[in-house]
Image (cartoon, coloured by chain):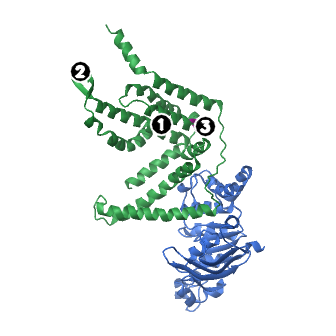
Chain colours: A blue, B green
Amino acid sequence: MSHHLVEAVDLHYAYPDGTAALRGVSFCITHGESVGLIGENGSGKSTLLLHLNGCLLPSKGQARIGGRPVTKETLRDVRRAVGMIFQDPDDQLFMPTAFEEVAFGPRNLGTPPDEIDALATRALATVGAAHLRDRPPYRLSGGEKRAVAIASVLSMAPDILVMDEPTSNLDPRTRRQIIELLKTFPHTKIIATHDLDLVMDLCRRVIVLHAGRVTADGPTEDIFRHPDLLAEAHLEPPLRMQACPVCAAVIPPPAPCQ
Amino acid sequence: MSHIETALLDIRGLDALSVRDSPLRRIDPRAKTLTALAFIVAVVSFGKYEIAGLIPLVVYPIALMAVDGLPPRIVLSKVLLALPFVALIGAFNPVFDRAAMVRIGPLDISGGWISFASILLKSLLTLSAAVILIATTGFSAVCVALDRLRVPRVFVVQLLLLYRYLFVLAEEAARMLRAWSLRSAGRRRLPLGAFGPFAGQLLLRSMDRADRIHAAMLSRGFDGRMRTDRVLRFRAVDAVFVLAWVALFVAARLYNAPRALGEAVMRSLP
């Protein structure tokens, strides 16, 4: 089970122009955990995620997957274990059809051609996109693109799913479908997002990032009960935990509407 | 809708056409790609003042469109897009090459005009061959064919990505243009001074996007090779398709049928 461990040990990273994005981030995420990574725009969330599969290598400190540091030598195994779903599906989908897209990863991993069909078909079916198989990705709707992007990562059978804003730009029903879908995944999940209601639904643990440092790390309910802590990271409690303006008129405060 | 956006829909429509079924579409993509290449080589191998000799080659695009049921209007509309550029290339021929070559009654036609017409005709033929190839085969199938024909992988990957991100880039440009036009107070054209920042902005955005795409590809194990395992079968009918067309192109190149016909007509006249 230890190969699902995701660790950051005093992670530092500065972009080539000198902007320090991470200033000593440390945490340890264990097998099967689902963790929300929250923080203001520019707090370093996306930069941190890119370290978890070696798209960026730290200037100081270490990212460790399954106890092994992420370095040039371990990249292949790390990328096999960590499935990364990017914020903009257009950045992720580049093959001519949805099927080719989902088959891209397994082919690179050297999966035998006769298994690829079944693998890709299953991944597409899992996200409810079996019917999109032969459609070109650029013609899909936002929600369909997102589903295919998730399938394209699932087909590589990763142990850990890393997601950057999985519900941005989606209509409420599609957002709900993606949340329900993610709920069914047994993988270790790390989700960077501003959608704190999604975090309430999916994550039992939250890491708050502010100006490149971890300012809080703990159970979701505890952290969301500290508005000052959230405010420091330019966040507000999830809408479900805020007083409902409609109910508040009927029921006098301070009863919060769940 | 802006001009760029309509043009984009057009290109997509062209690719979508290749999903239909017809005898031509069942021909192996390699056979169609090779034949189209042979056709283009045959057309450009004609001399610069040649017009009559090219005419028999018109049969290739016309036959393909007829067999496939591809509307000529669609093909022509795509070809016409490129014609202004072609016309620009040949525009100075009539100016520099004024020696009379052909006399029709009282009219002297200079070599420049003939070579200009030859350039136009050659472009019409080669461009329509390319458009028909994409419309009957699909861009990705052409890329697979090129890959199987041992075209270096780098080029094939470049082509695939170019085609995929053409839309993304053009949409980006269309959004920027729309944002500009909403604040342009009725001006139609981007002023020359704004063009530099506009193009620069587009370049920077594209580079950022290229970085993100590359990261996404690396994340899924990309190592510089595009792997496809689409099964292609080169059947006897595919070989016949290639050989018959190539034989026709060679014949058209070696034997000037229109001139022979003309001479025969002249001889039969009293």
Mark nearest the camera among 3 and 2 is: 2
Residue occupying the far top of the picture: B270
* Residue B165 within the magenta-colored segment of the rendering: no
The answer to which image quadrant residue B29 occupies is: top right
Horizontally, residue A136 falls left or right of residue B184, namely right
What's the amino acid at mark 3?
Answer: Asp
Main secondary-structure element of the magenta-colored stretch: helix
Dot 2: within a 10 Å radius of its alpha carbon, few (fewer than 14), some, or many (20 or more) residues? few
| Magenta-tinted stretch | B25-31
Give the residue number, with chain letter if any, for mark 2.
B105
- What is the quadrant of the N terminus of chain B in the image? bottom left
Q: Position of residue B177 (x, y in %)?
A: 37, 61
Whether residue B76 can be seen here: yes
Q: Position of residue A114 (x, y in %)?
A: 74, 49
Give the chain of mark 3: B
The answer to which image quadrant residue B75 occupies is: top left
Dot label at residue B28: 3
Horizontally, residue B105 falls left or right of residue A191, namely left
Question: Which of the two labelled residues, at mark 2 and mark 1, occupies the earlier sequence position?
Answer: 2
Q: CA distance from mark 3 to mark 1?
A: 16 Å
Horizontally, residue B92 falls left or right of residue A74, namely left
SS of the residue under disc 3:
loop
